[in-house]
Amino acid sequence: MIRIEADGAVVSAILDAPEVKNAFNASMITDLSSAISDAALNEGCHCLIITGANGTFCTGRDLSEEVDPTLEAVLTREGEWEQIFQQLRQFPKPSLAVVEGHAVAGGFTLAMGCDFVISDAKAVFGAFEMRNGFPAAINTPLLAKLVAPRLALEWALLGEPISARRLYEMGLINRLVEDHDRLSEVVNDFVSHLTRLNPLAVRAAKEIHHVARNTSLADALVVGAQQNSLISASGWLTEGMRKFSGSRRKT
């Protein structure tokens, strides 16, 4: 199941299936998709946290689930899983994966699909799908965007465990928490910075960031200039300059 908890400007979607170490079944995929959609539409939500209960993040797909093998059902099921990452890609607010325990197979994919990752130092990641004879078909394109191509292919093919420290050193984890007892403290501090930001500015920054990652620098600079023009024309820039000047006079 997916538990939803709201605390001020933060909405948490918590994977909670202890009997399978938070592996996801069809209903959990549907519920997670709904949680992301609801958070996107919730004006009071300024940050979405995705995490797991009972000391682990997610161990991927629940392979013990009986599923309809017909082509139509398979296409629907896999389309719903893909849709999770389309939603996270288009999510107008920051999304944060908080990881402890294992984030492997689809759990690794889910963590990498979020904007930010905070992890316990002892957490283990990995594209374990190949161990069961099939490729990490959704995680592979994510990894190809996030790391060097040779390394992304190695991870996708070999399915070896990857330490949280290695991912942190490669820039795929934002905060690595050595003392597990401080995990909540580190998360709260990080999220407090995010939730204080102007939501419209966050949305605009995320949009230009995605453009820059997926187009040429020349095209991204054009889009950036257009975004600046909209900011200036709306009066947003003038208001920001007024606030900055006021704060500078106080220092």
Image: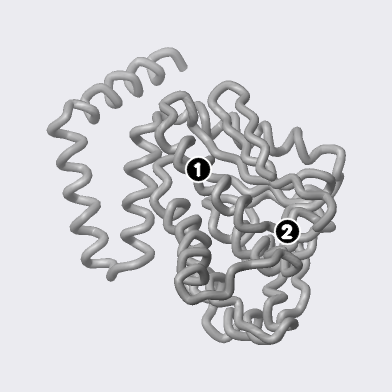
Q: Residues within 10 Å of mark 2 (few under 14, many from 20)?
A: many
From the viewer's perspective, tell me whether residue 161 is left or right of residue 152: right
Crowding around mark 1 (Cα neighbors within 10 Å: few <14, some 14 to 19, many 20+) is some
Q: Which mark is residue 23?
A: 2
Q: Residue at x 65, y 86 (%)?
A: 157
Mark pair 1, 2: CA separation: 18 Å
**Quadrant in the picture for residue 24:** bottom right
Answer whether residue 24 is visible to the viewer in this image. Answer: yes
- 18 to the left or right of 140: right
Query: How many numbered badges does the structure rendering display?
Result: 2
Residue at 65 percent across and 80 percent down: it is: 155
* Residue 166 in the image: above or below residue 80: below
Residue 121 visible in the shown view: no
The disc labelled 1 sits on which kind of residue? Answer: Ser
Residue at 24% over, 52% down? 224
- Residue topped by disc 1: 34
- Name the residue type under label 2: Ala
Residue furthest to the top:
250
Question: Picture coordinates of residue 187 (x, y %)?
Answer: 69, 38
Quadrant of residue 204 within the rendered picture: top left
Q: Nearer the viewer, residue 222 or 95?
A: 95
Whether residue 226 is situated above or below residue 213 in the rendered picture: above
Q: Which residue corresponds to the image point at 45% horizontal and 30% vertical from the top-left?
A: 197
Apparent side of residue 156 relative to residue 241 in the rendered image (left or right): right
Percent position of residue 84, x then y:
50, 55
Q: Secondary structure at mark 2?
A: loop
Of all residues shown, which one is farthest toward the left? 233
Name the disc covering residue 238, or none: none
Q: Quadrant of the N terminus?
A: top right
